[in-house]
Image: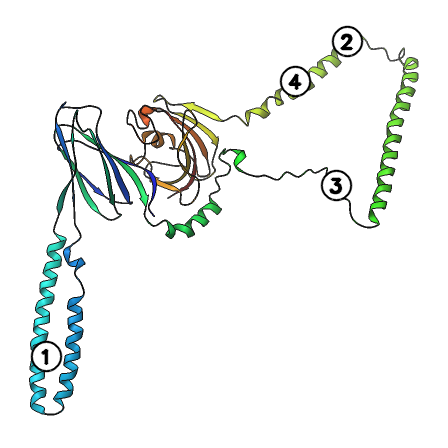
Amino acid sequence: MTVRMNLWSLTLVPGEPVPLYVRRDFQITNAALTEELRSNDGRSVVKVTHHPIPASAFESDSEFDSDEEMDDEEMDAMIAENESDDDAEEAAEAEDKEGDDEEESDDEEEDDFSDDEDIEETSVLCSLTAGKSEQAVLNLTFVEGEVVIFEVSGPNAVHLMGNYVNQWPEEESDCDSDCESHDDYSDMGLDEDEFSVEEFSEDEEIAPKGKIVAIEEKKVEKKAAKKEEKKAEPVKATKRKAEEEPEASPAKALSKAEKKKLAKKAKTEEAPAAAAAPAAPKEKETKKKTLPSGLVIEDVKVGDGPAAKPGKRLGMRYIGKLTNGKQFDANTGGKPFSFVLGRGEVIAGWDQGLAGMAVGGERRLTIPAKLAYGNQKIPGIPANSTLKFDVKLVSIN
């Protein structure tokens, strides 16, 4: 079963063929005219040039079957050769001739294969006309290792849209278990309601079995009695101090200068405590900055690994949502989404927002429409939409 993954897109300009080496399997699902039209009634034809599968690959194994049958006949001939030496010589000459014929057939087959490899076929994907049929639904899959050339003829540019696909998801079952164990995504701010957490109270005491219960009850009674005695002692001490203070007060009267010194000491001791108190909540605050392009970057957690640089391949976990909170895409388990930073393989908001991020770090990106998909209408994403991504950098290669 084919599983659709991240979005894939390509814009074709008339007169500019786009050669493409397929690094990952992808599927084209839609073709549409771009927003700016050079001609209001022009016709644009989208074509693809590729190497078709040679017809020789579909031929049956009849040739090999015939060779096996000839081998049986030769065995019968070898048995007959034992009857006379003359027949043996004739059979040897016949084998030499057959060997020459086989070599000639092999040479012809090699020529056929070389001719098949040089064949290139150009196919028409769709035809779009401004004002009449401005988009077409497609279902074409290109596999890893293919070399294709996309082009459009006509006055208007065409935008191709689709998804990267995984055509053999069962083969990645081992990777899924490994990635889930090492790349935990539970600390990225997901809803706590989705998880069941058992809370245990430290004050909860479980009564043991047997005679120990009686012993513990006695201990509890002794502790309660000691607490009552301790409470009574401070009351008596305060009464004694209250009785002794009137007698000592006349001898220990403070002057105005001494009172001022004591007030200054109290202020100096209170100042560091007041300064330390507001420092605690600052650690919880996220570092937030806004770039001139309108991109908002919030560092939820700073990583301690290598930093992301242009040209490096990054492994990412992410959750993509609209401003209304609706989720349109996510990668929270299995194989992390990977791409090369700064090559235009993702939207511009990712190329700008992930630069400098360290492995293990988490960020929240608020990407304006001009750095995302602009005025394009994409399934699940309306035109001119601001996108929000919670991302986590898992690896750098």
How far apart are labels 2 and 3 at the CA level?
Answer: 57 Å
Determine which residue is flagged by label 3: 205
Q: Earlier in the sequence, mark 4 or mark 2?
A: 2
Residue 35: x %, y % from top left: 22, 24
Residue that appears at 10% across and 59% down: 112
Displayed quadrant of residue 341: top left
Residue 34 can be seen in this image = yes
Query: What amino acid is at disc 2?
Result: Ala
Tag 2, which secondary structure? helix
Mark sitting on residue 103: none
In terms of depth relative to the viewer, which is nearer, 256 or 33?
A: 33
Q: Which of marks 1 and 4 is nearer the N terminus?
A: 1
Residue 61: x %, y % from top left: 18, 65
- Residue neighbourhood size for the residue with mark 2, other residues' Cα within 10 Å, grouped as few (<14), some (14–19), many (≥20): few
In terms of depth relative to the viewer, which is nearer, 242 or 316?
A: 316
In terms of depth relative to the viewer, which is nearer, 58 or 338?
A: 58
Determine which residue is flagged by label 1: 95
- Residue neighbourhood size for the residue with mark 1, other residues' Cα within 10 Å, grouped as few (<14), some (14–19), many (≥20): few
Determine which residue is flagged by label 4: 271
Determine which residue is flagged by label 2: 257
Query: What amino acid is at disc 4?
Result: Ala
Tag 4, which secondary structure? helix
